[in-house]
Amino acid sequence: MKRLTLTSLGQIREADITFGDMTIFVGEQASGKSILLQLVKLISDAGGITQTLKKHGFDWHKKMENFLSLYFGEGMGTIWNKDETKVTIDKADFTPLNALSKRKKEESLFLIPAHRVVTLKDGWPRAFTDYGASDPYIVKEFSEKLRLLMEAGLGSGKRAIFPQEGRMNKTVREAIGKSIFGEGEIKLDRSGLRKRIILDVAGTQLPFMVWSTGQREFAPLLLGLYRLMPSGKAQKKDNINWVVIEEPEMGLHPQAISALLLIFLELLRRGYKVIVSTHSAQILELVWAIQLIAKSKNPPARLRKLLDLKANAYSYDLTETVIHTKTFKTYYFFRKDSVVEVKDISKLDPEDPDKSVSDWGGLTLFSTKAADIVTEAVWESNT
């Protein structure tokens, strides 16, 4: 999957996406980013999606509108206009009817949804059938994947669930622990009538609902990463080539977002293609810095300094791989005349005359304006 073009899908009027090794979507709320990401999942894993729905007893009675409601969620049955909507992937036409006719195949794209916090009910992942027909497929599937991961052993041992040796690279593990969970350990609590995960802080056991917002939002993302970063010598999960993460920064302090940046690069190093939708300028700052370092042929040591990485074999491999072999694309979803259009702003040039490029899809608009106002105020006070 290299290029996706679409016309008239939901509120999106036009989009032409060429994917990089890491592709970033920015734009205000309800601008269609999630719809497009769910479409990418449907294109990649259509056969598995239909088989999974059938397995859990969902039936669309051979009607495309019913299938769209089951997949995208309640109220989305008319998202696809048979007379106007057109989607092509690498020049091949795609329709939901393609999805209904495909046979099951191995999953190739793993999507971590924005609504991930709802997947942990009382500290344990919910089953697929715990959700209703009106809930988006991606939430149900993600929750089921976490449940199976916990039942398969991650949530059955005596060791801490996090941090855990052999899970993730030590550098990544320490960055997450320091900036998100502090001195706490995520553990399995078996004392009640039902298993649950708790946060152990210096011997005090905290149930899921009293964790900080950032910790609760990050916990299911962390479990998803465990699935993508298998223990042992395997670099990536079999058959999965794409990782999509929606709004990974939710509830996190900027210092914790720095740990996210390292996670993205680790996924790239392992060979995944990564797509991220975000409202965080910090993520684009990383991409901007990487692109400038590569373009100016500066040494990868600049990137190691930016990420506060110690000079060792891992950090050398990570930064060399990212700087010299990976490509980055950024797209801005914006409203125009009551519909959404999508613009390529991959240059991220602060001096570009196109404000959508220079303001990074609006993410730096306020800081730029604040700097201009303060400069004016200082100038007037001095004159």
Image (spheres, helix red, strand yellow):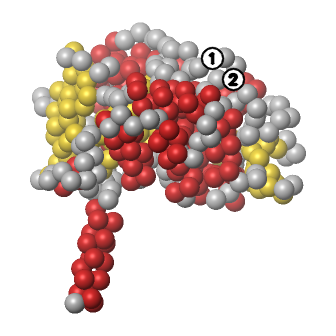
Left or right of 340, for residue 180: right
Q: Quadrant of the C terminus?
A: bottom left
Counting from the top left corner in percent of width and height, residue 183 is at 76, 53
Residue nearer the viewer, 51 or 111: 111
Q: What secondary structure is found at the residue carrying circle 2?
A: loop
Q: Can I make out residue 175 in this image?
A: yes
CB within 8 Å, label 2 to label 1: yes
Mark 2–mark 1 Cα distance, whole angstroms, equals 7 Å
Residue 69 visible in the picture: no
Check disc 2 and give the amino acid type.
Ser
Q: Which of 87 and 296 is in front in this view?
A: 296
Mark drawn on residue 231:
2
Question: Residue 213: x and y, percent?
Answer: 59, 58
Give the label on residue 234, or none: 1
Going 65% across and 38% down the picture, which residue do you hit? 171
Left of 27 or right of it: where is 232? right
Question: What residue is rendered at 25% in x and 53% in y?
Answer: 350
Up/down of 328 relative to 202, above or below: above
Vertical position of residue 383 compared to residue 185: above or below: below
